[in-house]
Amino acid sequence: MSMDADALQRFMAASPFINWSGMRITDADHEGKTLTMTMALKAEFERAANTGQWHGGPIAALIDTAGCFGLIMVIEQGSPTINFRTDYLKPAVNTDLTAVATIRRVGKTVGVVDVDVYNDDKQLVAVGRGTFGSQGG
Amino acid sequence: MSMDADALQRFMAASPFINWSGMRITDADHEGKTLTMTMALKAEFERAANTGQWHGGPIAALIDTAGCFGLIMVIEQGSPTINFRTDYLKPAVNTDLTAVATIRRVGKTVGVVDVDVYNDDKQLVAVGRGTFGSQGG
Amino acid sequence: MSMDADALQRFMAASPFINWSGMRITDADHEGKTLTMTMALKAEFERAANTGQWHGGPIAALIDTAGCFGLIMVIEQGSPTINFRTDYLKPAVNTDLTAVATIRRVGKTVGVVDVDVYNDDKQLVAVGRGTFGSQGG
Amino acid sequence: MSMDADALQRFMAASPFINWSGMRITDADHEGKTLTMTMALKAEFERAANTGQWHGGPIAALIDTAGCFGLIMVIEQGSPTINFRTDYLKPAVNTDLTAVATIRRVGKTVGVVDVDVYNDDKQLVAVGRGTFGSQGG
Protein backbone atom coordinates (compact mmCIF):
# COMPACT_ATOMS: atom_id res chain seq x y z
CA MET A 1 0.00 0.00 0.00
CA SER A 2 1.46 3.30 -1.05
CA MET A 3 0.23 6.15 1.09
CA ASP A 4 0.31 9.05 -1.37
CA ALA A 5 -1.85 12.16 -0.95
CA ASP A 6 -4.81 10.56 -2.75
CA ALA A 7 -4.75 7.40 -0.66
CA LEU A 8 -4.49 9.45 2.53
CA GLN A 9 -7.34 11.68 1.38
CA ARG A 10 -9.56 8.64 0.76
CA PHE A 11 -8.64 7.30 4.21
CA MET A 12 -9.60 10.64 5.73
CA ALA A 13 -12.86 10.87 3.78
CA ALA A 14 -14.02 7.66 5.46
CA SER A 15 -14.25 9.62 8.71
CA PRO A 16 -17.52 11.56 9.04
CA PHE A 17 -15.87 14.12 11.34
CA ILE A 18 -12.92 14.80 9.06
CA ASN A 19 -15.17 14.83 6.04
CA TRP A 20 -17.59 17.29 7.61
CA SER A 21 -14.67 19.49 8.73
CA GLY A 22 -13.47 19.76 5.15
CA MET A 23 -9.81 18.97 5.89
CA ARG A 24 -7.94 18.32 2.64
CA ILE A 25 -4.40 17.06 2.06
CA THR A 26 -2.43 19.30 -0.28
CA ASP A 27 0.99 17.69 -0.03
CA ALA A 28 2.39 14.38 1.20
CA ASP A 29 6.18 14.54 1.22
CA HIS A 30 7.43 11.08 2.14
CA GLU A 31 11.08 12.05 1.83
CA GLY A 32 10.84 15.18 3.93
CA LYS A 33 8.43 13.44 6.29
CA THR A 34 5.94 16.30 6.18
CA LEU A 35 2.24 16.24 5.45
CA THR A 36 0.33 19.43 4.58
CA MET A 37 -3.40 19.85 5.07
CA THR A 38 -5.84 22.76 4.66
CA MET A 39 -9.16 23.52 6.31
CA ALA A 40 -11.53 26.27 5.20
CA LEU A 41 -13.36 28.51 7.64
CA LYS A 42 -17.05 27.81 7.94
CA ALA A 43 -19.79 29.40 10.00
CA GLU A 44 -19.87 26.54 12.52
CA PHE A 45 -16.19 27.14 13.38
CA GLU A 46 -16.59 30.74 14.53
CA ARG A 47 -15.64 31.67 18.08
CA ALA A 48 -18.04 34.64 18.20
CA ALA A 49 -20.76 35.35 15.67
CA ASN A 50 -19.82 37.36 12.60
CA THR A 51 -16.22 37.93 13.68
CA GLY A 52 -14.62 35.46 11.28
CA GLN A 53 -12.39 34.33 14.17
CA TRP A 54 -11.78 30.60 14.50
CA HIS A 55 -12.73 28.90 17.76
CA GLY A 56 -9.78 26.98 19.15
CA GLY A 57 -11.63 23.67 19.12
CA PRO A 58 -11.51 23.11 15.35
CA ILE A 59 -7.85 24.21 15.35
CA ALA A 60 -7.04 21.54 17.94
CA ALA A 61 -8.98 19.01 15.86
CA LEU A 62 -6.89 19.98 12.82
CA ILE A 63 -3.66 19.51 14.80
CA ASP A 64 -4.82 16.10 16.04
CA THR A 65 -5.77 14.98 12.52
CA ALA A 66 -2.71 16.37 10.73
CA GLY A 67 -0.37 14.79 13.30
CA CYS A 68 -2.14 11.46 13.11
CA PHE A 69 -2.18 11.30 9.30
CA GLY A 70 1.42 12.52 9.18
CA LEU A 71 2.40 9.39 11.08
CA ILE A 72 0.02 7.22 9.00
CA MET A 73 1.82 8.45 5.86
CA VAL A 74 5.09 7.13 7.27
CA ILE A 75 4.04 3.88 8.94
CA GLU A 76 1.42 3.10 6.26
CA GLN A 77 -1.18 1.84 8.69
CA GLY A 78 -3.77 3.35 11.04
CA SER A 79 -2.57 5.11 14.19
CA PRO A 80 -4.43 6.20 17.31
CA THR A 81 -3.68 9.59 18.88
CA ILE A 82 -2.28 9.03 22.38
CA ASN A 83 -1.89 12.63 23.48
CA PHE A 84 -1.11 16.05 22.09
CA ARG A 85 -0.45 19.60 23.12
CA THR A 86 -1.99 22.64 21.47
CA ASP A 87 -0.56 26.17 21.82
CA TYR A 88 -2.53 29.08 20.40
CA LEU A 89 -0.17 31.85 19.25
CA LYS A 90 -2.38 34.37 17.45
CA PRO A 91 -6.09 34.71 16.64
CA ALA A 92 -6.95 33.22 13.24
CA VAL A 93 -9.40 35.60 11.56
CA ASN A 94 -11.10 35.47 8.15
CA THR A 95 -8.65 32.92 6.85
CA ASP A 96 -8.35 29.31 5.89
CA LEU A 97 -5.82 27.27 7.84
CA THR A 98 -2.83 25.29 6.61
CA ALA A 99 -1.32 22.66 8.89
CA VAL A 100 2.16 21.27 8.26
CA ALA A 101 2.88 18.06 10.17
CA THR A 102 6.53 17.08 10.58
CA ILE A 103 7.49 13.63 11.85
CA ARG A 104 10.11 14.03 14.58
CA ARG A 105 10.54 10.37 15.40
CA VAL A 106 9.02 6.96 14.74
CA GLY A 107 9.74 4.43 17.47
CA LYS A 108 8.58 0.89 18.12
CA THR A 109 5.46 1.82 20.06
CA VAL A 110 4.95 5.55 19.43
CA GLY A 111 5.77 8.36 17.03
CA VAL A 112 6.17 12.07 17.79
CA VAL A 113 4.83 14.65 15.34
CA ASP A 114 4.96 18.46 15.31
CA VAL A 115 2.23 20.46 13.63
CA ASP A 116 2.53 24.14 12.66
CA VAL A 117 -0.70 25.93 11.72
CA TYR A 118 -0.63 28.99 9.45
CA ASN A 119 -3.14 31.56 8.25
CA ASP A 120 -3.42 32.78 4.64
CA ASP A 121 -0.63 35.31 5.28
CA LYS A 122 1.70 32.46 6.29
CA GLN A 123 1.71 33.67 9.88
CA LEU A 124 1.88 31.03 12.58
CA VAL A 125 -1.43 30.91 14.51
CA ALA A 126 -0.98 27.71 16.52
CA VAL A 127 1.48 24.88 17.11
CA GLY A 128 0.84 21.30 18.15
CA ARG A 129 2.95 18.36 19.28
CA GLY A 130 1.63 14.87 19.76
CA THR A 131 2.37 11.25 20.45
CA PHE A 132 0.65 8.71 18.21
CA GLY A 133 0.71 4.90 18.31
CA SER A 134 3.06 3.32 15.78
CA GLN A 135 1.82 -0.26 16.11
CA GLY A 136 -1.30 0.31 14.01
CA GLY A 137 -4.94 0.25 15.13
CA MET B 1 -21.87 39.90 37.36
CA SER B 2 -22.62 36.54 38.90
CA MET B 3 -21.44 33.72 36.71
CA ASP B 4 -23.99 31.01 37.53
CA ALA B 5 -24.76 28.12 35.18
CA ASP B 6 -27.34 30.14 33.25
CA ALA B 7 -25.07 33.12 32.72
CA LEU B 8 -22.25 30.84 31.58
CA GLN B 9 -24.61 29.01 29.25
CA ARG B 10 -25.73 32.28 27.68
CA PHE B 11 -22.07 33.29 27.28
CA MET B 12 -21.39 29.96 25.55
CA ALA B 13 -24.44 30.22 23.31
CA ALA B 14 -22.99 33.40 21.80
CA SER B 15 -20.30 31.25 20.21
CA PRO B 16 -21.42 29.64 16.92
CA PHE B 17 -18.95 26.77 17.38
CA ILE B 18 -20.01 25.95 20.93
CA ASN B 19 -23.64 26.37 20.02
CA TRP B 20 -23.36 24.07 17.03
CA SER B 21 -21.46 21.51 19.13
CA GLY B 22 -24.32 21.36 21.59
CA MET B 23 -22.18 21.72 24.72
CA ARG B 24 -24.37 22.40 27.73
CA ILE B 25 -23.45 23.31 31.31
CA THR B 26 -25.08 21.05 33.87
CA ASP B 27 -23.38 22.27 37.03
CA ALA B 28 -21.38 25.33 38.08
CA ASP B 29 -19.96 24.77 41.55
CA HIS B 30 -18.26 28.02 42.58
CA GLU B 31 -17.29 26.71 46.00
CA GLY B 32 -15.77 23.45 44.74
CA LYS B 33 -14.34 25.28 41.73
CA THR B 34 -15.67 22.71 39.29
CA LEU B 35 -17.75 23.19 36.17
CA THR B 36 -19.59 20.30 34.52
CA MET B 37 -20.58 20.23 30.87
CA THR B 38 -22.19 17.62 28.57
CA MET B 39 -22.01 17.09 24.83
CA ALA B 40 -24.21 14.69 22.90
CA LEU B 41 -22.90 12.48 20.12
CA LYS B 42 -23.94 13.55 16.67
CA ALA B 43 -23.24 12.11 13.23
CA GLU B 44 -20.67 14.78 12.39
CA PHE B 45 -18.56 13.73 15.40
CA GLU B 46 -18.02 10.13 14.35
CA ARG B 47 -14.48 8.87 13.78
CA ALA B 48 -15.58 6.15 11.33
CA ALA B 49 -19.01 5.90 9.74
CA ASN B 50 -21.70 4.01 11.65
CA THR B 51 -19.39 3.02 14.51
CA GLY B 52 -20.75 5.44 17.08
CA GLN B 53 -17.14 6.16 18.09
CA TRP B 54 -16.21 9.77 18.77
CA HIS B 55 -13.40 11.32 16.77
CA GLY B 56 -10.78 12.83 19.09
CA GLY B 57 -11.17 16.31 17.63
CA PRO B 58 -14.53 17.13 19.23
CA ILE B 59 -13.27 15.66 22.52
CA ALA B 60 -10.31 18.04 22.44
CA ALA B 61 -12.70 20.89 21.64
CA LEU B 62 -14.80 19.91 24.67
CA ILE B 63 -11.71 19.91 26.90
CA ASP B 64 -10.65 23.34 25.60
CA THR B 65 -14.13 24.79 26.15
CA ALA B 66 -14.76 23.21 29.56
CA GLY B 67 -11.36 24.36 30.83
CA CYS B 68 -11.85 27.86 29.51
CA PHE B 69 -15.36 28.29 30.96
CA GLY B 70 -14.23 26.72 34.24
CA LEU B 71 -11.80 29.59 34.63
CA ILE B 72 -14.37 32.14 33.38
CA MET B 73 -16.69 30.93 36.17
CA VAL B 74 -14.02 31.82 38.74
CA ILE B 75 -12.55 35.04 37.33
CA GLU B 76 -15.90 36.27 36.02
CA GLN B 77 -14.53 37.61 32.76
CA GLY B 78 -13.52 36.22 29.38
CA SER B 79 -10.36 34.14 29.14
CA PRO B 80 -8.29 33.02 26.14
CA THR B 81 -6.93 29.48 26.00
CA ILE B 82 -3.12 29.66 25.98
CA ASN B 83 -2.34 25.95 25.65
CA PHE B 84 -3.68 22.57 26.67
CA ARG B 85 -2.84 18.89 26.63
CA THR B 86 -5.27 16.16 25.64
CA ASP B 87 -4.76 12.50 26.57
CA TYR B 88 -7.13 9.91 25.12
CA LEU B 89 -7.58 7.00 27.53
CA LYS B 90 -10.31 4.87 26.03
CA PRO B 91 -12.52 4.94 22.91
CA ALA B 92 -15.81 6.76 23.54
CA VAL B 93 -18.53 4.75 21.76
CA ASN B 94 -22.29 5.30 21.52
CA THR B 95 -22.29 7.66 24.45
CA ASP B 96 -22.70 11.28 25.36
CA LEU B 97 -19.74 12.91 27.07
CA THR B 98 -19.53 14.66 30.42
CA ALA B 99 -16.58 16.96 31.13
CA VAL B 100 -15.71 18.01 34.66
CA ALA B 101 -13.36 20.99 34.81
CA THR B 102 -11.49 21.56 38.08
CA ILE B 103 -9.59 24.80 38.70
CA ARG B 104 -6.13 23.93 40.04
CA ARG B 105 -4.83 27.46 40.36
CA VAL B 106 -5.66 31.04 39.47
CA GLY B 107 -2.61 33.31 39.24
CA LYS B 108 -2.10 36.89 38.18
CA THR B 109 -1.59 36.15 34.49
CA VAL B 110 -2.75 32.55 34.01
CA GLY B 111 -4.94 29.86 35.51
CA VAL B 112 -4.46 26.07 35.32
CA VAL B 113 -7.49 23.82 34.85
CA ASP B 114 -7.86 20.02 34.72
CA VAL B 115 -10.66 18.44 32.71
CA ASP B 116 -11.81 14.83 33.10
CA VAL B 117 -14.09 13.46 30.38
CA TYR B 118 -16.47 10.56 31.11
CA ASN B 119 -18.79 8.35 29.08
CA ASP B 120 -22.33 7.44 30.14
CA ASP B 121 -20.97 4.59 32.29
CA LYS B 122 -18.86 7.10 34.24
CA GLN B 123 -15.68 5.65 32.78
CA LEU B 124 -12.85 8.07 32.05
CA VAL B 125 -12.33 8.39 28.28
CA ALA B 126 -9.97 11.38 28.14
CA VAL B 127 -8.20 13.90 30.37
CA GLY B 128 -7.12 17.43 29.63
CA ARG B 129 -4.97 20.05 31.33
CA GLY B 130 -4.68 23.62 30.17
CA THR B 131 -3.39 27.09 30.84
CA PHE B 132 -5.81 29.95 30.30
CA GLY B 133 -5.32 33.72 30.58
CA SER B 134 -6.59 35.22 33.84
CA GLN B 135 -6.39 38.88 32.83
CA GLY B 136 -9.57 38.80 30.73
CA GLY B 137 -9.89 39.19 26.95
CA MET C 1 7.80 -9.77 42.50
CA SER C 2 5.81 -7.64 44.90
CA MET C 3 6.47 -3.95 44.38
CA ASP C 4 6.01 -2.60 47.89
CA ALA C 5 7.58 0.67 49.04
CA ASP C 6 10.86 -1.06 50.04
CA ALA C 7 11.24 -2.87 46.72
CA LEU C 8 10.51 0.35 44.81
CA GLN C 9 12.99 2.25 46.97
CA ARG C 10 15.71 -0.33 46.24
CA PHE C 11 14.89 -0.06 42.51
CA MET C 12 15.22 3.73 42.74
CA ALA C 13 18.47 3.57 44.71
CA ALA C 14 20.09 1.74 41.79
CA SER C 15 19.85 4.98 39.82
CA PRO C 16 22.73 7.38 40.54
CA PHE C 17 20.59 10.39 39.63
CA ILE C 18 17.66 9.44 41.84
CA ASN C 19 20.01 8.44 44.63
CA TRP C 20 21.91 11.72 44.46
CA SER C 21 18.63 13.65 44.37
CA GLY C 22 17.54 12.06 47.63
CA MET C 23 14.05 11.09 46.44
CA ARG C 24 12.45 8.72 48.92
CA ILE C 25 9.19 6.76 48.73
CA THR C 26 6.97 7.30 51.75
CA ASP C 27 3.86 5.45 50.65
CA ALA C 28 2.97 2.88 47.99
CA ASP C 29 -0.79 2.42 47.89
CA HIS C 30 -1.49 -0.38 45.41
CA GLU C 31 -5.24 -0.30 46.01
CA GLY C 32 -5.61 3.45 45.60
CA LYS C 33 -3.03 3.41 42.80
CA THR C 34 -1.06 6.27 44.31
CA LEU C 35 2.64 6.51 45.08
CA THR C 36 4.03 9.20 47.40
CA MET C 37 7.61 10.42 47.30
CA THR C 38 9.55 13.17 49.11
CA MET C 39 12.62 15.15 48.14
CA ALA C 40 14.54 17.42 50.50
CA LEU C 41 15.87 20.81 49.45
CA LYS C 42 19.60 20.95 48.99
CA ALA C 43 21.97 23.75 48.01
CA GLU C 44 22.41 22.42 44.48
CA PHE C 45 18.65 22.74 43.85
CA GLU C 46 18.39 26.47 44.51
CA ARG C 47 17.14 28.74 41.74
CA ALA C 48 18.99 31.81 43.09
CA ALA C 49 21.68 31.73 45.78
CA ASN C 50 20.55 31.91 49.40
CA THR C 51 16.88 32.28 48.54
CA GLY C 52 15.78 28.78 49.49
CA GLN C 53 13.67 28.73 46.32
CA TRP C 54 13.68 25.54 44.27
CA HIS C 55 14.76 25.71 40.64
CA GLY C 56 12.10 24.20 38.39
CA GLY C 57 14.48 21.60 36.95
CA PRO C 58 14.62 19.35 40.03
CA ILE C 59 10.84 19.68 40.40
CA ALA C 60 10.38 18.42 36.83
CA ALA C 61 12.79 15.58 37.59
CA LEU C 62 10.71 14.68 40.65
CA ILE C 63 7.52 14.64 38.54
CA ASP C 64 9.18 12.43 35.92
CA THR C 65 10.44 9.99 38.56
CA ALA C 66 7.27 9.87 40.65
CA GLY C 67 5.13 9.29 37.56
CA CYS C 68 7.44 6.60 36.26
CA PHE C 69 7.65 4.70 39.56
CA GLY C 70 3.92 5.10 40.10
CA LEU C 71 3.39 3.09 36.93
CA ILE C 72 6.18 0.64 37.86
CA MET C 73 4.33 -0.02 41.13
CA VAL C 74 1.26 -1.08 39.14
CA ILE C 75 2.78 -2.95 36.20
CA GLU C 76 5.59 -4.43 38.32
CA GLN C 77 8.28 -3.96 35.70
CA GLY C 78 10.46 -1.15 34.43
CA SER C 79 8.87 1.64 32.41
CA PRO C 80 10.37 4.35 30.21
CA THR C 81 9.01 7.89 30.34
CA ILE C 82 7.59 8.78 26.93
CA ASN C 83 6.57 12.37 27.61
CA PHE C 84 5.28 14.56 30.39
CA ARG C 85 3.99 18.04 31.07
CA THR C 86 5.07 20.18 34.02
CA ASP C 87 3.06 23.17 35.27
CA TYR C 88 4.57 25.38 37.95
CA LEU C 89 1.84 26.87 40.15
CA LYS C 90 3.66 28.61 42.99
CA PRO C 91 7.29 29.14 44.04
CA ALA C 92 8.54 26.41 46.39
CA VAL C 93 10.61 28.14 49.08
CA ASN C 94 12.46 26.73 52.11
CA THR C 95 10.53 23.51 51.98
CA ASP C 96 10.87 19.86 51.16
CA LEU C 97 8.63 18.56 48.38
CA THR C 98 6.08 15.77 48.43
CA ALA C 99 4.93 14.26 45.14
CA VAL C 100 1.76 12.19 44.92
CA ALA C 101 1.52 10.14 41.72
CA THR C 102 -1.94 8.87 40.75
CA ILE C 103 -2.37 6.30 38.00
CA ARG C 104 -5.14 7.48 35.65
CA ARG C 105 -4.97 4.60 33.22
CA VAL C 106 -2.89 1.58 32.30
CA GLY C 107 -3.28 0.51 28.68
CA LYS C 108 -1.58 -2.10 26.52
CA THR C 109 1.25 0.15 25.37
CA VAL C 110 1.16 3.18 27.66
CA GLY C 111 -0.02 4.37 31.05
CA VAL C 112 -1.06 7.90 32.07
CA VAL C 113 -0.07 9.24 35.48
CA ASP C 114 -0.84 12.53 37.25
CA VAL C 115 1.60 13.94 39.80
CA ASP C 116 0.73 16.66 42.33
CA VAL C 117 3.66 18.32 44.12
CA TYR C 118 3.16 19.93 47.54
CA ASN C 119 5.26 22.04 49.88
CA ASP C 120 5.48 21.48 53.65
CA ASP C 121 2.29 23.50 54.16
CA LYS C 122 0.43 21.11 51.86
CA GLN C 123 0.06 23.82 49.22
CA LEU C 124 0.23 22.74 45.60
CA VAL C 125 3.43 24.07 43.98
CA ALA C 126 3.43 22.13 40.70
CA VAL C 127 1.46 19.53 38.76
CA GLY C 128 2.64 16.99 36.23
CA ARG C 129 1.00 14.62 33.78
CA GLY C 130 2.87 12.00 31.81
CA THR C 131 2.72 9.04 29.49
CA PHE C 132 4.92 6.09 30.35
CA GLY C 133 5.50 2.81 28.53
CA SER C 134 3.54 -0.13 29.94
CA GLN C 135 5.34 -2.89 28.05
CA GLY C 136 8.43 -2.86 30.30
CA GLY C 137 11.96 -1.79 29.39
CA MET D 1 21.11 45.88 28.73
CA SER D 2 22.37 43.79 25.86
CA MET D 3 21.73 40.11 26.41
CA ASP D 4 24.65 38.56 24.52
CA ALA D 5 25.98 35.08 25.31
CA ASP D 6 28.29 36.37 28.05
CA ALA D 7 25.56 38.34 29.82
CA LEU D 8 23.22 35.36 29.66
CA GLN D 9 25.97 33.07 30.97
CA ARG D 10 26.56 35.39 33.93
CA PHE D 11 22.81 35.48 34.60
CA MET D 12 22.76 31.67 34.55
CA ALA D 13 25.82 31.37 36.78
CA ALA D 14 23.93 33.21 39.53
CA SER D 15 21.71 30.14 39.84
CA PRO D 16 23.23 27.42 42.05
CA PHE D 17 21.25 24.72 40.23
CA ILE D 18 22.27 25.82 36.74
CA ASN D 19 25.83 26.37 37.89
CA TRP D 20 26.07 22.94 39.47
CA SER D 21 24.53 21.36 36.35
CA GLY D 22 27.26 22.84 34.22
CA MET D 23 24.97 24.25 31.52
CA ARG D 24 26.88 26.59 29.24
CA ILE D 25 25.67 28.89 26.47
CA THR D 26 27.56 28.38 23.21
CA ASP D 27 25.54 30.62 20.91
CA ALA D 28 23.03 33.43 21.32
CA ASP D 29 21.55 34.31 17.93
CA HIS D 30 19.31 37.32 18.43
CA GLU D 31 18.42 37.58 14.78
CA GLY D 32 17.52 33.93 14.32
CA LYS D 33 15.91 33.89 17.77
CA THR D 34 17.76 30.74 18.80
CA LEU D 35 19.86 30.06 21.87
CA THR D 36 22.23 27.09 22.06
CA MET D 37 23.38 25.51 25.31
CA THR D 38 25.49 22.46 26.21
CA MET D 39 25.56 20.24 29.28
CA ALA D 40 28.22 17.62 29.97
CA LEU D 41 27.40 14.20 31.37
CA LYS D 42 28.41 13.71 34.97
CA ALA D 43 28.11 10.74 37.31
CA GLU D 44 25.16 12.25 39.19
CA PHE D 45 23.13 12.37 35.96
CA GLU D 46 23.23 8.66 35.21
CA ARG D 47 19.99 6.71 34.98
CA ALA D 48 21.62 3.39 35.95
CA ALA D 49 25.11 3.01 37.38
CA ASN D 50 27.99 2.71 34.92
CA THR D 51 25.78 2.78 31.84
CA GLY D 52 26.58 6.30 30.73
CA GLN D 53 22.86 6.79 30.03
CA TRP D 54 21.33 10.09 31.03
CA HIS D 55 18.39 10.06 33.43
CA GLY D 56 15.46 11.99 31.96
CA GLY D 57 15.34 14.41 34.89
CA PRO D 58 18.44 16.43 33.97
CA ILE D 59 17.30 16.45 30.31
CA ALA D 60 13.99 18.00 31.37
CA ALA D 61 15.90 20.52 33.49
CA LEU D 62 18.01 21.42 30.44
CA ILE D 63 14.87 21.93 28.34
CA ASP D 64 13.31 24.13 31.02
CA THR D 65 16.46 26.24 31.33
CA ALA D 66 17.20 26.54 27.62
CA GLY D 67 13.60 27.55 26.89
CA CYS D 68 13.57 30.08 29.70
CA PHE D 69 16.88 31.71 28.75
CA GLY D 70 15.90 31.66 25.09
CA LEU D 71 13.01 33.93 25.97
CA ILE D 72 15.18 36.00 28.33
CA MET D 73 17.55 36.63 25.42
CA VAL D 74 14.67 38.14 23.45
CA ILE D 75 12.74 40.04 26.11
CA GLU D 76 15.91 41.08 27.99
CA GLN D 77 14.46 40.52 31.43
CA GLY D 78 13.83 37.57 33.74
CA SER D 79 11.08 35.11 32.86
CA PRO D 80 9.35 32.43 34.91
CA THR D 81 8.60 29.04 33.36
CA ILE D 82 4.83 28.55 33.31
CA ASN D 83 4.69 25.05 31.84
CA PHE D 84 6.54 22.80 29.44
CA ARG D 85 6.31 19.45 27.74
CA THR D 86 9.21 17.01 27.46
CA ASP D 87 9.28 14.16 24.93
CA TYR D 88 12.09 11.62 25.10
CA LEU D 89 12.92 10.28 21.64
CA LYS D 90 16.06 8.18 22.09
CA PRO D 91 18.33 7.18 25.00
CA ALA D 92 21.24 9.61 25.43
CA VAL D 93 24.33 7.50 26.18
CA ASN D 94 27.96 8.50 26.78
CA THR D 95 27.43 11.91 25.28
CA ASP D 96 27.19 15.55 26.17
CA LEU D 97 23.92 17.26 25.29
CA THR D 98 23.29 20.28 23.11
CA ALA D 99 19.98 22.11 23.43
CA VAL D 100 18.79 24.52 20.75
CA ALA D 101 15.97 26.79 21.90
CA THR D 102 13.90 28.48 19.18
CA ILE D 103 11.47 31.28 20.04
CA ARG D 104 8.15 30.57 18.31
CA ARG D 105 6.27 33.58 19.61
CA VAL D 106 6.52 36.41 22.11
CA GLY D 107 3.17 37.76 23.23
CA LYS D 108 2.09 40.31 25.80
CA THR D 109 1.87 37.89 28.70
CA VAL D 110 3.64 34.72 27.51
CA GLY D 111 6.17 33.42 25.02
CA VAL D 112 6.35 29.96 23.43
CA VAL D 113 9.73 28.29 22.93
CA ASP D 114 10.73 24.98 21.30
CA VAL D 115 13.84 23.14 22.47
CA ASP D 116 15.56 20.37 20.50
CA VAL D 117 18.14 18.30 22.38
CA TYR D 118 20.93 16.51 20.48
CA ASN D 119 23.67 14.04 21.36
CA ASP D 120 27.28 14.33 20.14
CA ASP D 121 26.31 12.62 16.88
CA LYS D 122 23.73 15.34 16.23
CA GLN D 123 20.90 12.87 16.71
CA LEU D 124 17.75 14.17 18.35
CA VAL D 125 17.33 12.63 21.82
CA ALA D 126 14.53 14.78 23.24
CA VAL D 127 12.27 17.70 22.35
CA GLY D 128 10.64 20.26 24.60
CA ARG D 129 8.01 22.96 24.19
CA GLY D 130 7.18 25.50 26.86
CA THR D 131 5.30 28.61 27.82
CA PHE D 132 7.23 31.25 29.72
CA GLY D 133 6.10 34.57 31.19
CA SER D 134 6.97 37.60 29.06
CA GLN D 135 6.20 40.29 31.65
CA GLY D 136 9.43 39.76 33.60
CA GLY D 137 9.82 38.37 37.13
Image: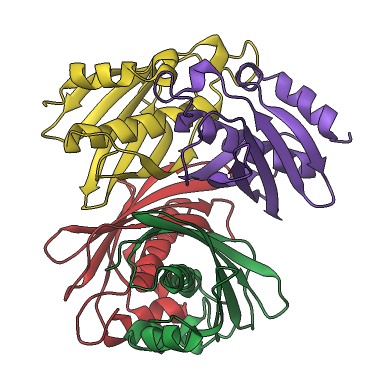
Chain colours: A yellow, B purple, C green, D red
- Quadrant of the rendered image containing residue A12: top left
Residue D70's place in the image compared with D109, above or below, is below
Q: Which residue is drawn at 83% across and 28% down?
A: B7
The one nearer the camera, C91 or B52, is: B52
- Quadrant of the rendered image containing residue B133: top right
Q: In this view, does D90 lie to the left or right of C76?
A: left
Q: Residue at x 39, y 89 (%)?
A: C10
Which quarter shows the C terminus of chain D? bottom right
Report if residue A42 is visible in the image: yes
Q: Is residue A112 left or right of residue B17?
A: left
The one nearer the camera, B97 or A89, is: B97
Q: How many marks?
A: 0
Which residue ends up furthest to the right in the rendered image? Answer: B2
Where is residue A86? Give x, y as percent. 46, 40
The one nearer the camera, B64 or A125, is: B64
The one nearer the camera, B39 or B129, is: B39
Where is residue C35? Give x, y as percent. 54, 74
Q: In this view, does C72 lie to the left or right of B93?
A: left
Where is residue D48? Give x, y as percent. 27, 82
Where is residue D31? Give x, y as percent. 31, 45
Residue B128's place in the image compared with D96, above or below, is above
Q: Residue at x 72, y 27 (%)?
A: B24
- Quadrant of the rendered image containing residue A56: top right
Q: Which residue is drawn at 47% across and 30% down?
A: B57
Report if residue A40 is visible in the image: no
